Amino acid sequence: MKLSPTEEELMNHLWSLKRAFMKDLLDAYPEPKPASTTISTLLKRMQEKEFVAYKTFGNSREYYPLVTKENYFSKHINALIKNFFNDSPAQFASFFTKKTQLSDEELIEIKADIDNLLNKK
C-alpha cells in the first residue's frame, strides 16, 4: 500500500514527532497551514491503510505511526529497483552514484559502508 504525496508529507511530520495530537500536526506545517478537516481526512485514510493508529484521551486523539520511515521507504526503493533496474540492486547503485551530485566525502562514506559490509561476510 502506498501513501499519496499529501499523506507522505503528513506521515513525515508524524515520524518526526513520534506521537502527536491534531494541534501538534497542524503546528508542524508551514504557513499557510492546511485545514484541520483536511488533516482529519488524511489521518482517516492513513488509518484505513494501516499506517497510523491513535489512542483516545478524552475528546482528543494522539496519533502514532504503525510503520517506520525506514520500512516504508525500503519497500519503495525495492519496488523502484525491481521496476526500473531489472531487479538489480547493483544497477541501481551504479546509477545512483553516477547520476547524483555526491561529494567526495559522501562517496568515501558509501565506500566505507560497503567495505564494512564486505568485511562482515
Image (cartoon, rainbow, N blue to C red):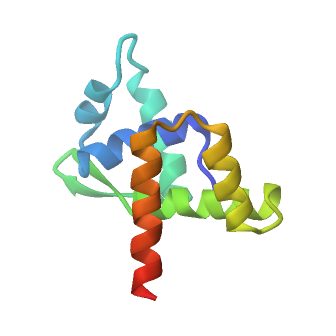
Give the farthest residue toward the left. Answer: 58
Report the number of discs.
0
Question: Could you tell me if residue 1 is visible in this image?
Answer: no
The x, y position of residue 62, in whole percent, is: 24, 50
Q: Residue at x 61, y 47 (%)?
A: 97
The x, y position of residue 102, in whole percent, is: 51, 38
The x, y position of residue 37, in whole percent, is: 44, 28
Name the residue nearer the viewer: 97 or 89.
Answer: 97
Q: Is residue 28 above or below residue 73?
A: above
Q: Is residue 105 above or below residue 67?
A: above
Name the residue nearer the viewer: 111 or 85.
Answer: 111
Question: Could you tell me if residue 57 is visible in this image?
Answer: yes
Q: Residue at x 29, y 36 (%)?
A: 22
4 left or right, relative to 68: right
88 left or right, relative to 76: right
Q: Quadrant of the N terminus?
A: bottom right
Q: Residue at x 76, y 65 (%)?
A: 82
Rendering quarter of residue 43: top left
Rendering quarter of residue 105: top left
Give the farthest residue toward the top. Answer: 32
Name the residue nearer the viewer: 36 or 92.
Answer: 92
Q: Residue at x 65, y 64 (%)?
A: 78
Rendering quarter of residue 66: bottom left
